[in-house]
Amino acid sequence: MPAVVSIIIPCYNAERWLAETLESALAQTWPDKEIIVINDGSTDGSLAVAQQFATRGVRVIDQPNRGASAARNHGLRVARGEFMQFLDADDLLAPDKIALQMRALEQAGPDALASASWGRFATDSTQADFIPQAVAQARTGVEFLQLHYETGSMMQPGAWLASRRLLDRAGPWNETLSLNDDGEYFTRVMLAARGLIHVASAQCYYRSGLAGSLSRRTDPSALTSLYRSVELTIRHLQAADDSPRTRAVCADAWMRTAFEVFPAMPELADKAENQSRVLGGSRRPLPGSGRFQLAARFLGWRLARRIFLA
């Protein structure tokens, strides 16, 4: 009998996109699945949209607003599946996404972690841009994180599929984090896994560029979460591997964090840059145009950031 896959969808004010997301979940060809929507205190019509799908087997749970990580943890507590798919309320899955990954995991074993190809889109998923990610070639969590910091490539959260056993070993989502909570969480998952497998034919779709989305926030709360998530991620990685390569990529990660929190939070930028120096400093260029790079060489990266990238 096929294993049950739970699709956990945290939802906060996603009325415009939730129906399409739920249709993509219901369309999964994997025969035994459950779909759980955790409405996280939405103030729009999200709850009403979700409840329209209850007659089609979607389980809807309403809770006060506590954040996406708390919603996902609630979903994990009530889910009955042996495998877990996290899906944001504005993203989509290709119909055979879960089936393809489950077949790969049947061969690799439940302690492996499966990823998929993902494409970025704004409104029309048929126009999604699938860009090959260097991290797709990683076969261990350590290698994934090294490649992530060296190349800037990533996996969108919906790309992963994992067994409950593996997730239990990694521990729950960190509910104190908002921005980059998925980065910290999946760091623990991939480091707990006994191997990573990339299923290139499995696909998911990442809706980006939305006004007001968490990933675009630059307020102090979000940037503090970013700093804290990087701090925890680096701590997890160095506990697993403290090789020269890992120390170098961690120095790069700290310098990139300093760049991202500046100029909104200069004190955090100072702390991040100091952490980079402790690890030997970063030799990797910061993101920016050729004009920015030239200005950074003569004026320093902070003044150049204010001039060109404010």
Image: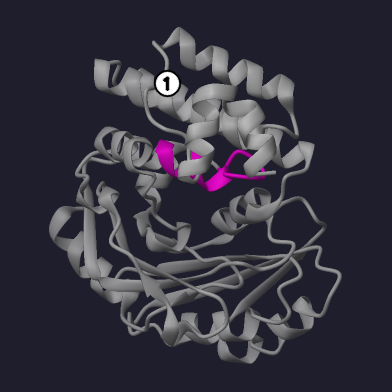
Answer left or right for 272 relative to 278: right
Farthest residue in the left direction? 107
Answer left or right for 230 relative to 239: right
Count how many numbered circles sit on residues in the image.
1
- Spot occupied by residue 24 in the image (x, y as percentages of width and height): 48, 83
Q: Residues within 10 Å of mark 1 (few under 14, many from 20)?
A: many
- Spot occupied by residue 32 in the image (x, y as percentages of width and height): 37, 78
- The residue shown at (42%, 36%) is 188
Q: Quadrant of residue 14?
A: bottom right
| Along the viewing direction, whichever of 306 and 123 lies nearer the viewer | 306
Q: How is the image coloured?
A: one colour
- The residue shown at (77%, 77%) is 47
- Spot occupied by residue 81 in the image (x, y as percentages of width and height): 43, 64
| Along the viewing direction, whichever of 242 and 274 lies nearer the viewer | 274
| Along the viewing direction, whichever of 284 and 85 lies nearer the viewer | 284
Farthest residue in the right direction? 43
Q: Is residue 142 visible?
A: yes
- The residue shown at (35%, 54%) is 163
Q: Which residues are magenta?
A: 173-188
- Quarter of the picture containing the N terminus is bottom left
Name the residue that disc number 1 marks: 251
Amino acid type, label 1: Ala
Q: Is residue 228 visible?
A: no
- Spot occupied by residue 209 in the image (x, y as percentages of width and height): 61, 67
**Residue 266 part of the magenta-drawn span:** no
- Quarter of the picture containing the C terminus is top right
Look at the picture and state if 243 lies above or below 297: above
| Along the viewing direction, whichever of 249 and 193 lies nearer the viewer | 249
**Residue 179 part of the magenta-drawn span:** yes
Dot 1 falls on a residue whose secondary structure is helix
Look at the picture and state if 230 lies above or below 208: above
- The residue shown at (21%, 54%) is 197
